[in-house]
Amino acid sequence: MSNAFKKYFVLVILFVFPIVIYLFFASGKNNFALLPVLTEEVNQIDEWESLSGEVVNFKNKISVLGFWGSEISIKRGDALNLNQKIYKRFYQFEDFQFVMILQKGEQDRVVELKKELSEGAGTDLVKWKFVFGTSEQIESLFSSLKAPLQLSTGLSSPYVFIIDKNSNLRGRDDDEDQGTLYGFNSQSVAEINNKMIDDVKVILAEYRRAWKKYNKPEAPE
């Protein structure tokens, strides 16, 4: 590698990369406006069973929360949409996770779906968290969102939700179509592309700015 090429490469890294990062976040809804809190302190899940055996919770995490209940057999399309459009784009951000809620007894079918996702994903699925609860636990968690939506008889929903690091539900209070947007229809590629991607960018940018604010080096005396 020639010295001239090395210098050019360094210049690209120093000047072009920051611009790319800026444009990535600047393309989010409302240009860095905060994503409104719609519901405070949804129920915790740290005492539920998880597929990996680890403790999963919402505290200090930015979570995409979904409900698959006992209907995982019809969730393949939802999973692929979310994995391709959201997870692969954002999974490298620290403290970002997917949390899928299922009914106890669905572990084997989750393993099969996760294997299928892994084979076609080209990404590390370590931040896909699968958590299992009773019917009562799942219904209580969904109710704690206080969203005007319902679970199916199989305790599933096509909608996924953004939960912030304080366990609050984030969404839109000025959506052009629905007024208040509590969740995103994972069956709709258009809604994921046109709304969910923007809102995930906004909340990640919010925490990125907060981190930079509180980690500024102290000025010399």
Image: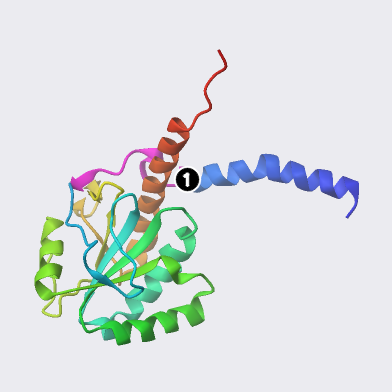
**Quadrant in which residue 71 is drawn:** bottom left
Q: Image check: 137 left or right of 220? A: left
Q: Is residue 175 visible?
A: no
Residue that extends furthest to the right in the rendered view of this protein:
2
Within-10-Å neighbours for mark 1: few <14, some 14–19, many 20+ = some
Q: How is the image coloured?
A: rainbow
Magenta stretch bounds: 25-39
Residue 62 relative to residue 170: left or right: right
Tell me if residue 4 comes above or below residue 124 in the rendering.
above
- 191 shown above or below 72: above
- Which of the two residues, 194 or 12, is positioned nearer the viewer here? 12
Q: Is residue 197 magenta?
A: no
Left or right relative to 22: residue 206: left
- Percent coordinates x, y for residue 186 in the rendering: 30, 69
Q: Secondary structure at mark 1?
A: helix
Is residue 66 positioned above or below 117 on the image? above
Observer-nearest of 194 and 151? 151
Inspect the image, locate mark 1, and give the three-letter code of the amino acid beneath it.
Phe
Outermost residue, top side: 221
Number of numbered discs overlaid on the protein picture: 1
Q: Position of residue 161 (x, y in %)?
A: 26, 59
Instruction: Give the residue at x 46% y 60%.
Output: 91
